[in-house]
Amino acid sequence: MKPELSLTQKQKLILTPQLYQAINILQLNLVELKDLIDEELVDNPLLEVKQETDSITEKVNQEENALTQTEESNQRREENNFDDWLSYLKEKDYRPLPNRSVVEKENRDENFIYYRESLQDYLLIQLGTVVSSDIDYKIGEYLIGSIDDNGYLTVGLDDISLDLNIKRDKIKKILSLIQSFDPPGVGARNLQECLLIQIKYLDISDIKIEKIIKYHLQDLARKSFKIIAKDLKISVSEVQSLADVIKNSFDPKPGRRVGNFKEVKYILPDLVVVRKIGGGYRVILNDTYLPQIEINPRYKTILEAGNNISPYDKGKLIKKGSISDHEIKDAKKYVEEKLNSAKWLIKGIEQRKKTIYRIAETLIEYQKGFLDKGILYIKPLTLRKLADRLEIHESTVSRAIHNKMVQTPRGLLKMKFFFSKGVDKKSGGTISTDKIKKLIKEYVSNENCLKPCSDQKLAGLLSEKGGVNISRRTVAKYREILKIPSSNLRKRFSI
């Protein structure tokens, strides 16, 4: 074949920086978006915060369409001196610097975060009251530093002995001292030791409980009450009563009583759903948490003045020695870049609002039965179905609902909650998997605890009462999702 040149046409998606930014903004939740805006406010001098913001209460009283906004007109124009402005930028060094420090403000959120005492702090205070020698305090401090948030010692005594070059018996003595601290059970090396420590402080004198903890913890977890009863020579019902005491009186994670929340997560709803007086629901964007940003009109006017400056005036400025032609071009380029960046940010935020609002409005309309009557009335819905209804791409819906929360009359819910897979009913139509889970939970709560329902029996109840045929394995999967134990672990014995 002879080599030849030919032209072909094909479609190709080019992910521009602007498109990438819009996609990123769409999938951010409210807290993450605020962090992004705060960063841009620091880096971009063309952006500023509007002083007045609307509250949720005020938005409820506004018209139904909260997204219809009109551009501000008759913006105030100020006379600007291009020469003075360039000199100001020159003095302030307008070029962005890497790792620029941010000036602390008096009313930053960090100044209002209070300190919460950790488990280690709580134990160190107790250690200081009972230990007098420096070496004992050093050992105790090392041991306390090796205790996790659940209250367990995570390092072996031999390793500590090697690190501190101190005899193991000395370290064990200090550990026994720490194990006498509050909360009871702290400093244990395993669950068995933790529960045995707590026996001393719970004033429990029943030797059978101690034997169960020492020799039958695994049997207790598997509810093998018959094995325990045979070994202790007591009835199965008595073993069950002792197991109830252990479950209700002992704490397998004593460190959690003090609590050490290293990471604080704030959950803010991106949308609020409220009932209308005449029926139905209204969706409101909860953007009061976000700073309302706009482009400073002064910079826009300055840029226009710079573009319209005559060659004579430019030469005059350069001749005066106040600024060079190169600096004038650099300043214009810098302002133009920041102006475009600000425009794309504002456009991306507005597009995010519109997309999330449209999706939420359709979701609330489709799942009105759930909001009115509860989980049993939620309808099956997929991302594809909603995307086709709104004539947008499925990936857009997925990004828009990612990590977003909605405050509804039914509580604070994830947007993903409104999407539910469906199972075909015997009578035709589909039923939501969430409804099936709810039915399973109801059947288990109403079962005879002496003869709990097996997975096969639950499948039969769903077929008879719920009108849906699903396999035993599917029932088991839903039961595990609901964290419901199997029938043999739910079984109780008559007393």
Image (tube, helix red, strand yellow):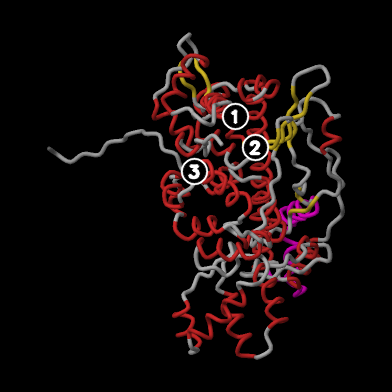
Q: Is residue 159 above or below residue 67?
A: below
- Front residue of this view, candidates 36 and 379: 379
- Front residue of this view, candidates 30 and 495: 495
* Mark found first going from the N terminus, 1 or 3: 3
Point 51% across, 31% down: residue: 450
Q: In the rendered structure, which amino acid carries the disc numbered 2? A: Gln
Quarter of the view holding residue 216: bottom left
> Mark 2, mark 3: which one is toward the viewer?
3
Q: Where in the figure is residue 328, as x and y percent of width and height?
A: 69, 64
Point 67% across, 42% down: residue: 349
- Identify residue for label 2: 351
Farthest-out residue, top: 427
Asked if residue 306 lies in the magenta stretch, the reply is yes
- Identify residue for label 1: 418
Mark sitting on residue 235: 3
Q: Which residues are magenta?
A: 297-324
Q: Is residue 491 left or right of residue 11?
A: right
